[in-house]
Image: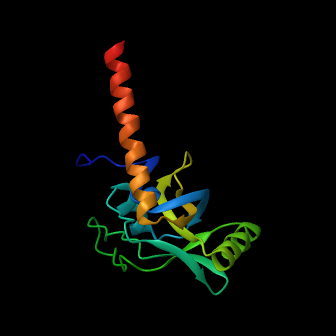
Amino acid sequence: MAAGKLISHGVAAQNRKARFDYAIRESIEAGIVLKGPEVKSLRHGRATLGEAWAGERDGELWLFNAYIPEYQGGILSRFEPRSPRKLLLKRKDMRRLIGEVTRAGASLVPLDIHFNERGRAKVQLGLGVGRKKADKRAAIAERDWARDKARLMRERG
């Protein structure tokens, strides 16, 4: 990200490995409760979701282990970078997702944090099942074949 360039809408952080490690069956957008300095830090695009996960605590959904670094622009911007953050969903959707996680053994994986058209921070959650090593190998082979096929088609005209 270029110095001084802020994200007003678009992707602020992305978990690119999530779609490789999990077979995502469904995705849903959720709001996230953030403090002011956390939003400023997100707008600089410095957050990481590599080890983040979403889960249930006290009947609500929370985002755990997402790293949003401290904002360097102000003196009153002290917060815990890996603190749990509450996710905002409709009650019906929240209950359905919690039920899927507990019954079916699925996982809630944050796919990305982005800003919508109104400038609000949102989290794209994926409901998925973990892939086994053989499934990952098949996905790699399929991706490689698609790339080679596109290259061949380009060469032929």
Whether residue 56 sits left or right of residue 77 in the image: it is right
For the point 34% across and 55% down, which residue is it?
A: 45
Name of the residue lying farthest toward the top: 157
Q: Quadrant of residue 148?
A: top left
Residue sitting nearer the eye, 43 or 122:
122
**Residue 28, picture quadrant:** bottom right
| Residue 124 visible at all | no
Query: 74 and 5: which one is in front?
Result: 5
Residue 152: x, y in percent? 34, 23
- The answer to whether residue 98 is above or below residue 14 is below
In the picture, residue 56 is in which quadrant? bottom right
Give the x, y percent position of residue 25: 61, 57
Q: Is residue 79 left or right of residue 35?
A: left
**Residue at the image point whose x is 39% and y is 55% from the top:** 137
Is residue 54 or residue 41 the one in the foreground? 54
Residue 90 lies, in percent from the top left, at 72, 66
